Amino acid sequence: MATTDTTAASEQLDARKTDWLDRLSELINRIDNWTKAADWSTRKIEKRMRDPEIGDYIAPALILQKETLRILLEPVARVTPGAEGVVDLYLMPAYDDIASLYFTNGDWQLHYMFPGTPTVNTIRDADSVTLSQDSLKKVLEEMVKNADCSLR
Amino acid sequence: MPTAVYVRLDRIKDVEREYLTTRLAVDRLIAAVRIDPAILEPKQGRDVRNADARLEHTYFIRLFAELETTLRSFFETRRDTTPKTQDLIDSISAMRRIPPDLTEYVHDVREFRNSLVHERSADIATITVAVARARICHYLSWLPPHW
């Protein structure tokens, strides 16, 4: 009986991991295609993740580059209060936070502080839009315009 | 597998994330204590004030430790010596042809960390965790993907 329970629990955890990795892969492939179409160079990389529930695993991440601008699309967490997955966008190589994606209500929501919008404490508090080719393009265009050096 | 340099950059970003989370927790605790001082033992009030005042510096020191560990990990694959940190940074900058202004930024981070550890404050510009993370990640991005 105990063995059956353990096996069932283990299968459930494997299924959660598979669902999350499938969701991430779909997101990364979608953004890869959209950005390639907008003349960004892209490179898929891997990130080692630690998760107290499903254990350690390797997740996909994506580097986007256009001229001197480099952006990392990186998975952060499989679950967080109010969302079933968080992926961040960072300006590299400084690793500056620029935008976040939260998977809620069956879709990815893009949070970004556009210039002129009210200042908020964290990117999660910023206005959000459903991720689409257009909303991502708008954020990337803003970043190209406003990319600043955070070294000082 | 993730590259060695990316694993290190990610660890440095993790330190900043932990700092921001702990900052939030301490701020919330202080707000809760204002409403109900009895949630703390009497002497814990002083400890919470100290934690609040020293939090960013504590994480700054951790951030620098990650930088130094990374640099020594890379350096020991190239040379059989153990230089002091200032020389370690200069040696790696020379090896990897890292721009002098970026090297200088990292030395400023080192000097600020030294001022915290050795309690020297004269003429040392304060550097935030966010700026230090940006400088360190920028600098480490000049290392090869693997070593």
Image: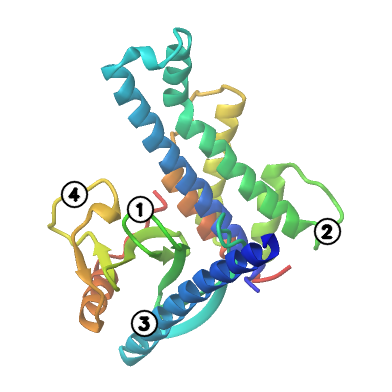
Label 2: chain?
Answer: B
Q: Secondary structure at mark 3?
A: helix
Query: Which badge, 3 or 4, comes first in the chain's sequence?
Result: 3
Disc 1 crowd, CA 10 A, few/some/many (<14, 14-19, 20+): few
How crowded pointer 4 is (Cα within 10 Å; few <14, some 14-19, many 20+) is rated as: few
- Residue B1 lies left or right of residue B17; in this view the side is right
Which residue is identified by label 2? B79
Q: CA distance from mark 1 to mark 4?
A: 22 Å
Q: Residue at x 71, y 49 (%)?
A: B88
Alpha carbon distance from label 3 to label 1: 25 Å
Identify the residue position indicated by label 4 in the image.
A119
Q: Is residue A120 above or below residue A11?
A: above
Residues indicated by labels 1 and 4 sit on the same polypeptide chain: yes
According to the picture, the residue beneath numbered tag 1 turns out to be: A81
Nearer the observer: mark 3 or 4; the answer is: 3
Q: Earlier in the sequence, mark 3 or mark 1?
A: 3
Q: CA distance from mark 3 to mark 4?
A: 27 Å
When the figure is inspected, residue A109 is found, relative to residue B22, above or below; the finding is below
Say few, some or many: other residues with alpha carbon within 10 Å of mark 2 (under 14 / 14 to 19 / 20 or more): few
Which residue is disc 3 drawn over? A31
Image coords of residue A22 (percent x, y) = 47, 79
Residue A113 x, y percent position in the rendering: 22, 59
Q: Are marks 3 and 4 in contact (CB under 8 Å)?
A: no
Question: At x 57% / y 36%, what residue is drawn?
Answer: B61
Between label 3 and label 1, give the one nearer the viewer.
1
User: Looking at the image, which is closer to me, A15 or A39?
Assistant: A15
Name the quarter where the N terminus of chain B is drawn. bottom right
Quarter of the rendering containing residue B34: top left
